[in-house]
Image: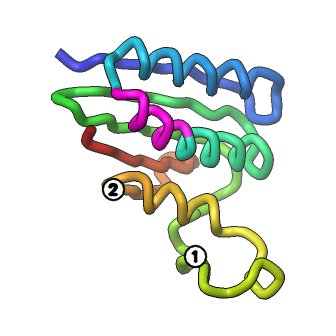
Amino acid sequence: MAARFERSLVAGAPGLAALIAEIEAWLDAAGVPAAQVARMMIAFDEVLSNITKHGGGTLSVGIAIDDRRLTATIEDDGPPFDPLARGAPDTDLGIDDRAIGGLGIHLVRELMDDVAYVREQDRNRLIFSKTF
């Protein structure tokens, strides 16, 4: 039987730090190894922070763990935005020579096994998964 976590938050509202802490505690309680929790939390922090900063409306987080595989679905009803549409940043360039933005989703892609985006029913949906 899969373990599940579901929460919603009004984007921009206070509570993001508490939500991130709650996700981390839930992952720990679900038996995810600490090193994997740390990697997963980078992804959650990056995605949720960007939605609250740039999105709008309400965001929802759904996490399922089944057979040592985490699948996270993060949705918001803000303006359409596909974070995967942008190419990977050139990390060989110096910090002053790089384009602004894109590094966070690059980290998510590197840390997770799969990352996908879809726009359905006026909602942005980012799904990422990781086997641990």
- Start and end of the magenta stretch? 33-41
- Which residue is tagged 2? 114
Residue 109 is drawn in which quadrant?
bottom left
64 vs 99, nearest the viewer: 99
Residue 81 is drawn in which quadrant?
bottom right
Residues under numbered marks 1 and 2 in contact, where contact means CB atoms less than 8 Å apart: no
93 vs 19, nearest the viewer: 93
Query: Which three-letter amino acid code belongs to the residue tagged 1?
Result: Arg
- Which residue is tagged 1? 86
Mark 1 lies on a secondary structure that is: loop
Query: Which three-letter amino acid code belongs to the residue tagged 2?
Result: Asp
Q: Is residue 37 left or right of residue 19?
A: left
Q: Is residue 30 left or right of residue 92?
A: left
Image coords of residue 30 (percent x, y): 34, 16
Was residue 34 drawn as part of the magenta stretch in this picture? yes
Q: Report, in whole angstroms, how far the alpha carbon at label 1 lies from the one at label 2.
A: 16 Å
Q: Residue at x 68, y 87 (%)?
A: 93
Q: Residues within 10 Å of mark 2 (few under 14, many from 20)?
A: some
Above or below, comparing residue 1 to residue 87 in the picture: above
Q: Residue at x 73, y 37 (%)?
A: 57
